[in-house]
Amino acid sequence: MPQKVQRVKGVNDILPQEAKQWQALEHVVKQVMDRFAFGEIRPPIFEKTELFARGVGEDTDIVSKEMYSFSDMSKSSLTLRPELTAGVVRSYIQNNLQQISPVQKLWYEGPMFRQERPQKGRYRQFWQFGAEAIGSPNPEQDAEMIALFYAILKELGVEKSVTLKINSVGDSESRANYRSSLQEYLRPQLSSLSETSQRRFESNPLRILDSKAPNDIELVQDAPKIRECLNEVSATHYAEVLKMLEVMEIPYVQDDLLVRGLDYYTHTIFEFTSDALGAQDAICGGGRYNDLVKDLGGQDVPAIGWASGIERLLLVVEALQPLMAESGLDLFLVVQGEELRVKAPKLINDWRKAGLNCDMDTLRRSMKAQMREANRQKARYVAILGEEEYDQGVVQLKNFSTGDQEVVLFEKVVDIIDEKL
Ligand code: HAM
């Protein structure tokens, strides 16, 4: 027997029943994006490796150890996108989107790829939907971005079981101030920090706040807070964002230890987390990235965005309030009699052309088996067709939920079902 080929570790098959939930979620996302006037963008799945190295940051976990990179025939190094912010910014610059309007509000959905250690809620191919607003430096743009994700949570009915954690990493001057005071605080304890944190002490000390090593966690509890090191511009921006959230009645908690694993952030950063998940509790993360467009060769244009992991968000939604996964099948055609095998496909095709979702058996099974199949597919109606019916141009139309059955002319089937749906 030939050996079966197995799925790659850390990736998922989304099967039809589950895909219905995905579609229900996607429907909500698209509707809310429209309400907030965001346009969809679909950048490519792979980009030049350099984009992520420069965009996300050489020193991040993503770039240093998690990327799926390969070289193509021309020996260029390419990478399956680990996230989409860098790709969206690349596209924004390359397509001169700032010429269309000074603020571009874009959203996307698609698979991302990171070679992380797989566990519940953490996969090597996972899906994100996300949004980026490029062009406005003002706090109302931060507030709108957060309100956008909150509106999606509300629409899904899960906003109460999710926590918005927020912090500010300020502008570069504020970060430089903070970096020195954090280093000053940690220097006497340097040798007791974990190996990774010791490495980050010079390259990126803020990430030490995010360390999972027990001793590091204890040490950073009393570390100086970045909030206290913000210069006036950064502190004012942050205070205004918080004020706007309050006015919009979006609850938040300030988390002084919140830092993000990507290097491009400035000012506001945030995550939405849920207790319904285990260790991988972030269902959405994002923040401002005022320097990225410039760093990737564009003009000096500020931006802010976020992305949400669909698998994780669905775990939360399913735990609380399963999305309606209704059968989409209006009608199942049950055929009785050899002669009709040739004629039935035309009949069902006509109903499909008229817009009904229909199915029929192609295994030549017994009538009983066909009824079972109609039931399994939760068809709303069954049309039973025997030779006698065919000669009279009718079917026995049975409403599966009420059990009512009536004789209906072929050409009336669509009207009757439409009327009752
Ligand atoms: P991120 O925090 O790396 O940010 O990812 C955003 C979300 O994607 C996470 O909160 C999580 O829900 C989901 N996610 C990340 N990694 C995995 C994984 N291995 N398996 C399953 N889900 C995962 C970004 O990607 C930024 N581009 C967000 C952003 C947009 N910032 C500004 N604009």
Image: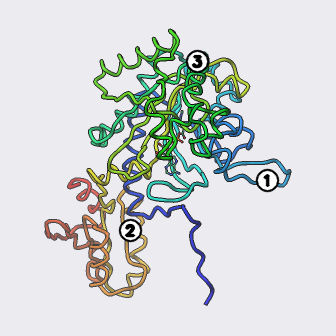
Q: Mark 1 or mark 2: name the one nearer the start of the chain.
A: 1
- Residue type at tag 2: Ile
Q: Check contact, mark 1 vs mark 2: CB within 8 A.
A: no
- Residue at coordinates 28% horizontally, 42% vertically from top-left? 161
State left or right for residue 56 relative to residue 319: right
Where residue 229 sits in the image (x, y, percent)? 51, 17
The numbered dot on residue 348 is 2
Q: Secondary structure at mark 3?
A: helix
Residue 61, x across and y down, in percent: 62, 45
| Mark 1, secondary structure of its residue | strand
Q: Is residue 397 left or right of residue 302?
A: left
Residue 13 locus on image (x, y percent) = 49, 64
Q: Nearer the viewer, mark 2 or mark 3?
A: 3
Residue at (72% x, 52% y) in the render: 69
Residue situated in front as seen by the camera: 297 or 216 = 216
Task: Name the amino acid, label 3.
Answer: Asn
Task: Give the vertical position of 9 relative to 255 (above or below).
Answer: below
Which residue is the site of mark 3? Answer: 177
Label disc, if present, on residue 71 of the rendered structure: 1
Label 3 within 8 A of ligand 1 by Cβ: no
Q: CA distance from mark 1 to mark 2?
A: 49 Å
- Classify 10 Å Cα crowding around label 2: few (below 14), some (14-19), many (20 and above): many
Outermost residue to the front: 188
Q: How many marks?
A: 3
